[in-house]
Amino acid sequence: MSTQAAADFAALVNISAEKWPPRQRTYFGSLEIRPVQAGEAFAITTIRGCTGVMDLGDKRLMEYRITAREIAEDIAREINGDSGEGSFHGVFVAAGDLPTEAELTDARKRLEEFQRRLVAAADLEWERTKNPMFITDLERRAARQLGLEKPWLYDAKPLEDCPVCGEKIKPGVAVCRSCRAILDREKAAQYGLVPQERKSVAESQRQSEKREKEAGK
Ligand SMILES: [Zn+2]
């Protein structure tokens, strides 16, 4: 029994470079899943079987054996299931001590399928909202890992408030989209957006201040 227990190992394979927060279990404490390092095709975290202790109350404890495979499957399920239905983050339990080519190919395929689904969801969101705030980190990461160029990969400059109506506007715009106030007269004139007699907000503000001053004298 003791030799059998000592030999109870399972290879938890990770094909992604993602660093996951350590997994916590009462029977082994904290466990870190090795991420893939540069030049590696996969990383292995060796899991060993454990003996758990169950408190039955009345100072009675019951020991129970958990196999390495059970623990490894549990951790893989937890990591992969993190992001909704069909989610897969590249962690699986090898049948042997090392992952086979077939196991690795299958895992790569599943990971890519999941990443493509994330990218498709982000594309749809972008189509609807054009708002990078609605794109998740997971979706950005998927696009980067697939080597895809996407307009939503980049954080846009933060929006500013229109000084006239208070609506959110892109920095540097000539005219406010909501209230049509001319915010940059020079730029607006350049694109023929400002009739000669109209004044920019800043300009009319300066003039009204001047008038108030004069009236106050
Ligand atoms: Zn405005």
Image (tube, grey):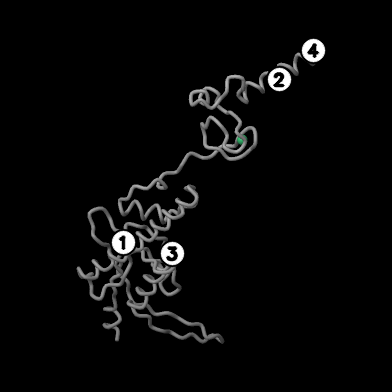
- The kind of residue on which mark 3 rests is Ser
- The kind of residue on which mark 4 rests is Lys
Circle 2 is placed at which residue position?
209
Name the quarter showing ligand 1: top right
Q: Nearer the viewer, residue 82 or 131?
A: 131
Left or right of 62? Residue 210 is right
- Between circles 1 and 3, the one closer to the viewer is 1
From the Cβ of disc 4, is ligand 1 less than 8 Å away?
no
* Residue 112 numbered tag: 1
- The kind of residue on which mark 1 rests is Glu
Q: Position of residue 6 (x, y in %)?
A: 28, 78
Circle 4 is placed at which residue position?
217
Label 2, label 4: how far apart the Cα atoms are: 13 Å
Count residues near mark 1 (Cα–Cα under 10 Å), then give few for <14, some for 14-19, many for 20+. some
Q: Secondary structure at mark 3?
A: helix
Q: Residue at x 28, y 65 (%)?
A: 109
Circle 3 is placed at which residue position?
83
Label 2, label 1: how far apart the Cα atoms are: 62 Å
- Between circles 2 and 1, the one closer to the viewer is 2
Q: Secondary structure at mark 1?
A: helix
Q: Residue at x 23, y 57 (%)?
A: 40
Give residue 167's quadrant in the image.
Answer: top right
Q: Are marks 1 and 3 in contact (CB under 8 Å)?
A: no
Q: Nearer the viewer, residue 134 or 26?
A: 134
Marks 4 and 1, the one that precedes in the sequence? 1
- The kind of residue on which mark 2 rests is Glu
Label 4, label 1: how far apart the Cα atoms are: 74 Å
Q: Are marks 2 and 3 in contact (CB under 8 Å)?
A: no
Task: Using the image, determine if residue 86 lies above or below residue 59.
Answer: above
